[in-house]
Structures are given as structure tokens and as C-alpha cells.
Amino acid sequence: MSAPIVEAFLARIYVDAQVRARFLSNPTAEALNAGLSHDEVEAVKQIDQVGLELFALSLERKRQRQCATRGRPNHFWRKRRA
Amino acid sequence: MGVLAAAAVEEGVVAVEADRFGLGWRPPLALEILSNLERIDVVEVIADDFFNASRSQRRALKTLAAQVPVTLHGVSLGLASSVAIDRRRLNLTARLCEEIRPLSWSEHLAFVRGGGIEIGHLAAPPRCDETIEGALKNLSLARTTVGVAPQVENIATLIDPPLSRYDEATWVSEIIRNSQSDLLLDLHNLHANATNFGFNPIDLISRIPPGRVRGIHLAGGKWVGKGDVRRVLDDHLHDVPDPVYALLEEIGARTEPGLTVILERDGDFPSIESLLNQVDRAREALARGRARALRREVAA
């Protein structure tokens, strides 16, 4: 298995909704395009789709939470001294 | 070995290392943790929170470490990958360890980036020979850079990792057996994966040599999804559920004292009393397991 290529492919379908949608509608084309071998393509066609959607959703929600709190200064140490 | 320990060995005295219980250090909890140190043996600090910390913040962390034993926990190295870990983050971890001299440091058996893309969360890699080999190389580099091997934590996953050759128990135990890293066993992660993918969590516990479990994480989560496609999400936003305490009791029955048990809570914080009560429940569960083992030993 070309593990680095597989990891890069998984990272893409986890975080990029467009790539994920293309993969779910045509897994063979998207996986071959990403450089996966024929055996790897056959394996990712059996992907746990429920898990993929739920994981992608949890990542999206985590990003939203981080955006909401980004830039909020951490004043804990200052408060403690006060 | 220290002078006292050497003398104890000489005289046949067996020193039993105590279990330690504590909380994950989070800024909103900081003041209340510091006000309740008589009920907390240890705090776990997220290493990544201090990679870009100011000098005064790092000084404050050293002050904290002087008040209470600290463990360091990393979240972004990406140890379980066929790709080498990020050297910059590893060097920053090494610097932090040098500065605060934690009891231990730990990271996850996860990949967090691939092909230049940051996933933004811990992801389960394909459980195969390539990622075992990659994890072992990364662990070796981490150990030589920091000077001490990290404990490694099993992660929760909502997706059954594709292209896997091994089940989780086999994959994790292979990494533990072939490295110098001990296991930081996250019992809620184990509970979530066992629930989501239909395996017995005891199978994984029984595959790890008892002496190689050195840390425990406790947390809570919630169900996500709908109807038949629901899964347990480990979100660290809920109280520790009963099955996790049951697993902790099982750990108590199978391991030697000296574990560090940390309750992780990342948000929706309840009162400190509620968190400390969960820490107390953990003490009781582990003690029940220890008592079971003792009874078994006496009976044998």
C-alpha cells in the first residue's frame, strides 16, 4: 500500500466537502485521480459511508467552534495575579 | 535509583507506587483546580497550548508544575502515520518537557495531516503494517528527541478506518509490544469504538501487557446520527458514563498500582464539585478493581 498517498487522500475526503461529494458519487474516478492503486480503489469503495459523513460533520462543527473562539485572548494568568 | 529506594530494596521492602488522579488543565477550570489541590494529585496540560506561549505564560506553567505534579499531553504530532512527524512540534514538545519536567508526556496514535492538508482533528489511520512501521519510526524519533518515550493514547473514531488489515486491538498491541512506549488507555475512546463497531472492549485490554498500561483517560460523549446509524462521539463535553467506570474497575483488577488517571473535560463545564465527584468515582472504581485482584491473589 502507498500509505502516504492513502493518508493524503483520506485527509482530503475528510475535510473537503466537494472532494467528498465527488468521491461518494464516483469513488473509482476520484480515488484513481488521487493516485490510489486499483487494489486501494477497490478497498476505498467499501468505505464506511455512515462513519465518513459523521466524521466529516464533526470536523466541520469543530472548525466552526474554533472560528467562534479564535482570537479570544487567554487572560487566565493575568486574572490570577489580579 | 535513589538512596532510599536502594535501601528499601536491600531490606526487602516493597515500595508500592500510588495511583494518581486528576483533571485536564483548562483555563476556565484553572482557579478552581488551584483551589482544590487537596483533592487532585496531578494535572494534565495540553502541550500544544504552550508552543507559542509568552515568556510569562511559560513561567506560570513552571510555577504550576512546582505546585502540583504535571503530565504533558500532545495533540498534533501525528504519530501513527507513514509520514514522519512534524519536527518543529516535536522540538517544541522537547523544550517544554525540559522546562517543566513532567511526570510523563503522551501523544495519540493518530494521523492529523496528509498531503499538506491539516485534518484539524485526530484521525484513525488505516490499521496496517505500513502505519505500524511508521508509528514505530516516529516513536523512536520522539523518544530520542525528547529523551523519554511518550505514552501513546488509543483514539476514538467515528469511521471504521478504510484499508485496514488489523482490528484495533491487534494494531495497538503491535505498536506497544514493538516500541518502548507505554499505553495511555483512554477508556471512553475504547468504549465509543467498541459500541460503534461492535467489539468487546475487554479484548483490547487483555491484549496489552498489564505493566504497559501506565495512564488512563476518562471522558464523556454523546450519540450522533439518526435511527440505526447512530454512533457515540467522544466530545469531552459530557460526564463520564457508567460503562467507563466499569472498564476502570477492570483495569484496577488487571494492573499494578502506579497509574495516572485523568478526567478530560473540554467545555460545557459543570461545577468543580461535579468534576471532583467524577474523580472520586474513578478512585472508587479503580480501588474496587484492586480489591478484586487482591481477593483473587489471597484465594489462590
Image (cartoon, rainbow, N blue to C red):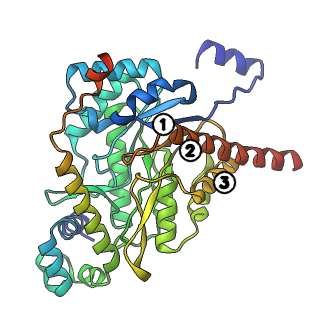
**Dot 3 alpha-carbon crowd within 10 angstroms: few under 14, some 14 to 19, many 20 or more:** many
Chain letter of disc 2? B
Amino acid type at image mark 1: Ile
| Residue at numbered disc 2 | B278
Residue at the spot of label 3: B250
Q: Nearer the viewer, mark 1 or mark 2?
A: 1
Q: Which residue is mark 1?
A: B272
Q: Residue B8 appears at what percent x and percent y?
A: 71, 18
Between residue B67 and residue B104, name the one nearer to us: B67
Position above or below: B218 against B4 = below
Which residue sits at x=57%, y=29%? Answer: B39
Query: What whole-number distance in Å separates the C-alpha atoms at marks 3 and 1?
Result: 27 Å
Q: Secondary structure at mark 2?
A: helix
The spot of residue B100 in percent (x, y) is 37, 23
Q: Residue at x 26, y 23 (%)?
A: B57
What's the amino acid at mark 2? Gln
